[in-house]
Image (cartoon, rainbow, N blue to C red):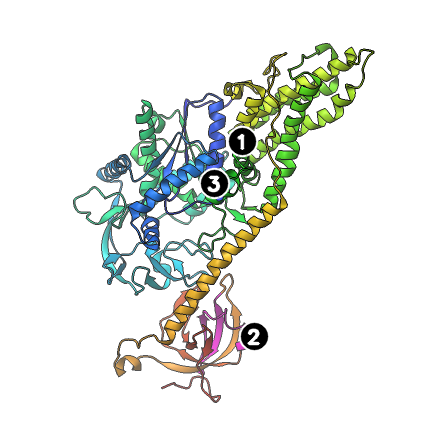
Amino acid sequence: MTTIPKRYLVTSALPYANGLKHIGHLAGAYIPADIYVRYLKAQKRDVVYVCGSDEHGTAIPIQATKEGTTAQAIIDKYHPIMEQNFRDLGIEFDIYHRTSSPLHHETAQEFFTALNSKGDLEIKESEQYFDEEANAFLADRYIKGTCPNCGFESAYGDQCEKCGKSLSPDELINPVSTLSGKTPVKKKTKHWYLPLDKHEAFLREWILTEHAGDWRANVLGQCKSWIDGGLQPRAVTRDLDWGVKVPLPDADGKVLYVWFDAPIGYISATKQWALDNGKDWKPYWEDQDTKLVHFVGKDNIVFHCIIFPVMLKLHGNILPANVPANEFMNLEGEKMSTSRNWKLEMQDYIDDFVNKENGGTQMADALRYYLTQIAPETKDSEFTWKGFQDANNSELVSIFGNFINRSMVLMHKLCKGKVPKLHEEALGELDRNVIGEIRAVKEKVELLLEQFKFREALFEVINLARTGNQYMQKKEPWIVAKQTGEDGQPVAEAQASIDNTLHICLQLCANLGILVNPFLPFTAKKICHMLKVVDKMLEWENAGSLKLLSVGYSLRPPELLFRKIEDAEISYQVDKLHAAAEQVKNQQTEINMEENTKTETAPVKPEIVFDDFAKIDLRVGKIVAAEKVEKADKLLKLSVDLGFETRTIVSGIAMHFKPEEIVGRQVTVVVNLAPRKMRGIESNGMILLAEDASGKLHFIHPEETINPGAGVS
């Protein structure tokens, strides 16, 4: 038998307060956590669910620059919006905190000081990119360049938004500062590092051995990949003016790196909750009888399974018992993207469905249902508007809502609006089978929720409603009611059958309220209202009982739990999605055209002397072979005959020329350029091309065919 912990501390990843959040975020870290917490609370377990806005890091000042305001104004704008969005969709935190709070700054600084004073951090001096015009060191998000993996020309210093590869600024090709647009220089700076490499043995044992049987395979797989690849020291400070100040006299202009301070936000949020409720926060982070569970998306696995656990271990805190991370959720066949406007924000859904006259909490639960049904628990999944409509209309309306409504309508029609008695002597095999299923489903759902298998657990709940519909259809109480005597009333045997059918159905309705409560909390409360019972009935210990409603108890008239979603609503949403993405695409096209126009009138580069030019060795070459570089949309691998040898040159021209079209072409080549690896291929030279105002590339070559290797002067 599994030992039940004394208490639980559940967290959801802190969302950046730099803009509205989409349903991919909701499905990844918030709905699963809310389901789990509601289940634990229904079990009367001691649980605290913490979250809050992540208000530091470069994302905040970058957004402030875009909106022409301050970082403080940005977080003050988005924090309350996100908090309200979560509330509108039924996410019930015990506290939704802020990392900009004085308590968090104090907690994060104390944490850093404790590790630093024990020698758990290392100080290193390194060269980092510096913008001389802006007079500032450049954090990774303040640097753009060409992705070495796919050739995308606007990759950030931490990640390429096109191919998704994690990067470092040093990997970018032709990096530029986003502050000034100028090429940055390298400048020495000092930072504090967390030496993850010293903790590889601990992590390997703790993750890959101790948790091999209970953590999700996708989580274990990503952790193993990181550990097997060799962990490196990771900076915990950075040169910025926005964030938690490093509490040391020789650290002016430095703040705690956001990945270091953000997870400490779980601790500061717990402290604030304890202050607000007269509790002691320490047992939730220091007592080994506390079960710590982090709910995150897959992009946060490394932080919550490798980095934060090392921090917690060094600081003397408990370690997470599980990190049930979800994969990504796509939208209508494509990856969700804020930059491309291919997304469904929580606020948009709330405005279009929840806050509408025919919306309300039923539509909040409809979204929770579909996102749970397609949750990316083990692999990426996809939200489609047609799928959402089908899930609502075919399952919530036609199965779950239909069963509750039929039971209530027939109870009022055939039993005078009161709960009928159960005639035990008249119970048949079909009746007993349904009673047995009601009692059995509780254990099924409970086991699945304890294992974080929320999709399967929800299926069992809906399947119980399906069983109820099938039972009622087979019993046909409306037909049995026609078996009347001379007084026009159903004969005794018929009345017993009607009573038993509707008694079992009504008790099943009450059980469905308990079982569905973690998933669809607004629906559960509405069921309680119709059954005229208090919310206390929703406590988990009541599930499986056939005595939830007293015989003779009058119930309220039925109300529809869900409404059908019409085709026109879905068409509107699909059109809206495509229109928003097309608008961004058109805006980007205009920007590109402006940039091309600027290229036409670009000023002459700084003057050089002849000796500088004389260092460049230009030769005529002939392309003898060409092929695309695997998984790189812009790169071609060329074999170029230079007369004295044939060289491999990687060139970013795949978007302009097909390989078969350029074989045999003469080109001008810089032959004394230092070799450079691109996608694992060593490139030995550079092809010279010209770009016109439209962005089209043209080869620079001699007018007449000459022998490869001829010099260009």
Q: Earlier in the sequence, mark 2 or mark 1?
A: 1
Percent position (x, y) of residue 522? 52, 30
Q: Nearer the viewer, residue 711 or 509?
A: 509
Q: Does residue 139 sit above or below 41 in this rendering? A: below
| Residue pointed to by mark 1 | 520
Q: Identify the residue shown where x is 44% and y is 62%.
A: 588
The kind of residue on which mark 2 rests is Glu
Check residue 452 for magenta coloring: no
Alpha carbon of mark 2 to alpha carbon of mark 1: how far? 58 Å
| Residue pointed to by mark 2 | 660
Q: Identify the residue shown where x is 81% and y is 15%.
A: 484
Q: Secondary structure at mark 2?
A: helix
Location of residue 556 (image quadrant): top right
Q: Does residue 237 sit above or below 700 in this rendering? A: above
Q: Residues within 10 Å of mark 1 (few under 14, many from 20)?
A: many
| Residue pointed to by mark 3 | 26
Specify start and end residues of the magenta stretch as a single range. Answer: 634-662
Q: Which mark is residue 115?
A: none
**In this rendering, does residue 198 appear at all?**
no
Q: Nearer the viewer, residue 110 or 529?
A: 529
